[in-house]
Image: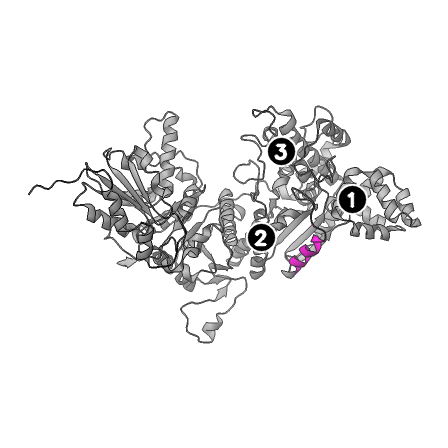
Amino acid sequence: MSTPPIPHLRIVQQRLLWLACWTVHNANALRPKDDGDIKVGGHQASSASMVSLMTALYFHALRPEDRVAVKPHASPVLHAAHYLMGRQSRENLENFRAFGGAQSYPSRTKDSIDVDFSTGSVGLGAAMPLFAALTQDYLHAHGWIDGRPAGRMVALIGDAELDEGNIYEALQEGWKHDLRNTWWVIDYNRQSLDGVMREGLWRRIEAIFTAFDWRVVRLKYGALQRAAFAEPGGEALRDWIDACPNALYSALTYQGGAAWRARLMDDIGDQGKTAALFDRRSDADLAALMENLGGHCLETLCEGFDAVADDRPTVFLAYTVKGHGTPLAGHKDNHAGLMTPAQMADLQTRLGVPEGQEWEPLAGVPDPGAFRAFLDDVPFFAAGSRRTRTDPLPVPTLPAPQDRVQSTQAGFGKILDALAKDGGPLSDRVLTMSPDVTVSTNLGPWVNRRGLFARDAQPDTFRDQKVPSTQKWAFSPTGQHIELGIAENNLMLMLGAAGLSHSLFGQRLIPVGTLYDPFVARGLDALNYACYQDARFVVVGTPSGVTLAPEGGAHQSVGTPLIGMSQDGLAAFEPAFLDELALIMGWSFDYLQRDGDAAPDERTWLRDETGGSVYLRLSTRPVEQPLRRDDPGFAQGVIDGAYWLRPPGPNADVVIAYQGCVAPAAIEAAGRLAGDRRDIGVLSVTSADRLNAGWTAARRARARGQTGARSLAERLLDDLPRHCTLITVIDGHPATLAWLGSVAGHRTVPLGVEHFGQTGTIADLHRHYGIDADAITAAARLTPGRPVRFVG
């Protein structure tokens, strides 16, 4: 490790502090506002506490292969660092928190700079690098990135983020999988949004990380403080600092040198040597000494980072002052506080920024040439963009299982098993994972063929002891399934990390995760976070709905179809039949590899070329399968979102539109109604999400002048007679399909489940919730149709 270039790093430190604070000040006090006096915000104090940490990391300790998640409120510092390196534009900084400008919180998808991990929902950004480290280990173990050094996956987090429960779920999962190459750097400023942290929290932090086999590095005292401790009387000063309550330390920091002197003299100044230590320093020097905590001292930070040369997971507990270096330092209200114009002018003078050069990257730098030469050699930025691209893998045709009666959940397992058996490039890159429900979500056959992943081989003890079992649970570096604990947040974060492997590590994975469908909601924050990263994966929610009859309401999902419709970056499907499922899975493996920017497909008005992730909602209900369907129109309809299972006649009185495992009830009801309702149609909806998205996109296109834009939903329903009634049915919330009546103005009767489920048989529950053939038939017969007249 090279000797830290402290003089240059001090200049970086000053430049980042100024540029971050000025960017926020410009957004709030200088830029014209369309919204009047509404505060723009930007967290100057939270940024200031991170300046020294990010200086030492980005401009000294980090290497191109490292990946970093920056705490949300330090976004201005991240943008300032890239601006200093010529990677961010002044225009974007001037438009910080404005439309099209630098984002409020670091974003992979919205920011123009290299952002390794988006942050914003606190706690998730801390955990994401941990799962990226596991993904990196997986790639190394499979021999796909041999010869390249393993990067450190780094999280810069605020101490208040440690209140988030997902932090501890992630720590335990990392311990289970022998985590390495992970750094967490905690900005221990002991202030949260609304107050001061509890006393002694550091002990709990250190105990927790130690329990999970992390190295704990405490960066508490800066070089000035350590030098003072070595002076006569210094030991008493150190003892006072260690015993000082957080709130008092912050208050004295805000009040300044005179307040420090008065309090220190009152508490320990009667000791002659200690009093002399204080007397040798002016008020300004004393304030600088007391605020010289480890997290603000470049010498201390560089020494601490440089001392860690192995791959053991390490947490750095860096003591800081929120708002350090600004007039806001230490005040308990500083989280959302903003410096006044007068305070900004004083800061500008102190940092030596000439008037009129506020946006100049090297304003006030004494030797710009030497400093620019230093910046040009900073390792982290030297390799240019760290985002990688990979070619898509070819997707083989996935044949549907030939069972006469089968559930979509079982069919999913059979399709994956066949893919595992046949092999090939795509099969080798599939990585499955599940939160302790591998067998009950039908991943067992895949795992039996492809094995479980661990960096070190672990035998299947039951098999070695000749204990009969259908499961082969051998772990090895070549395994392709990661068995997670019962924490859905961890599943979604692992899917997100593996789903970014092509961009982070230059190697494509096809991540597939399974969980019980109702527990999608338990992992929803992390699922949304993974989608916001533009991670690519398939998540399978199964079993679903009240159709999981004996399990009761705790395991029966109701609102998940609406989650699938509303979640950006996620195409949601709920097939009823195995041939539909096989088509959807094949399309999904291709879709998650796309990365284009083509115009919307005018057939659907969906932007499929941009790609995304996929959510499959599957069922345990065995359903009689249709005969072979080779019609290309059927296959296209399955992918686009809907097709006519039974096309309506020209005088149709009723159309039954269903999604998922209620298909038998819809088909049976249509048969019953054929005698007294004319030209009945049955619409199979495989994706209410895509059908609705296409309809919405076409309406927007027409509003922009593309008068010929028509969506699939409109093509399916526009030609129905005005008197026709739509009856929609789903084992889920009825709002999932109720919108179909708005497409062409048809009367609609939405059937579905609105309340918690309960135990019973499928027949009992479908009858109780009104989603069986009787309920559909009754709804149809209550509609004002035009009865068929029989002439005898």
Residue 443 visible to an observer of this rendering = no
Which amino acid type is marked by label 2?
Gly
Which amino acid type is marked by label 3?
Gly
Residue 392 image offset from top left, x and y in percent: 43, 46
Q: Considering only vertical position in the picture, is 620 above or below 30?
A: below
Q: Colour scheme in the image?
A: one colour
Residue 572 image offset from top left, x and y in percent: 39, 45
Q: Which residue is mark 1?
A: 292
Q: Residues within 10 Å of mark 1 (few under 14, many from 20)?
A: many
Horizontal side of 792 relative to 406 (left or right) equals left
Horizontal side of 316 relative to 499 (left or right) equals right
Q: Residues within 10 Å of mark 3 (few under 14, many from 20)?
A: some
Q: Quadrant of residue 24?
A: top right
Helix, strand or loop status at disc 3: loop
Which callout, 2 or 3, points at the residue further toward the start of the chain?
A: 3
Q: Main secondary structure of the magenta part?
A: helix
Which mark lies nearer to you, 1 or 2? Answer: 2
Quadrant where the C terminus lies? Answer: top left
Label 2 vs label 3: CA separation? 27 Å
Residue visible at 34% across and 57% down in the picture: 411
Residue 344 image offset from top left, x and y in percent: 72, 29
Label 1 vs label 3: CA separation? 27 Å
Helix, strand or loop status at disc 1: loop
Horizontal side of 736 relative to 123 (left or right) equals left
Q: Considering only vertical position in the picture, is 129 above or below 355?
A: below
Which mark lies nearer to you, 1 or 3? Answer: 3
Q: Which mark is residue 165?
A: 2
Q: Which residues are magenta?
A: 196-210
Q: Which residue is mark 3?
A: 41
Which amino acid type is marked by label 1?
Asn
Q: Is residue 307 within the magenta segment?
A: no
Q: Nearer the viewer, residue 726 or 1?
A: 726
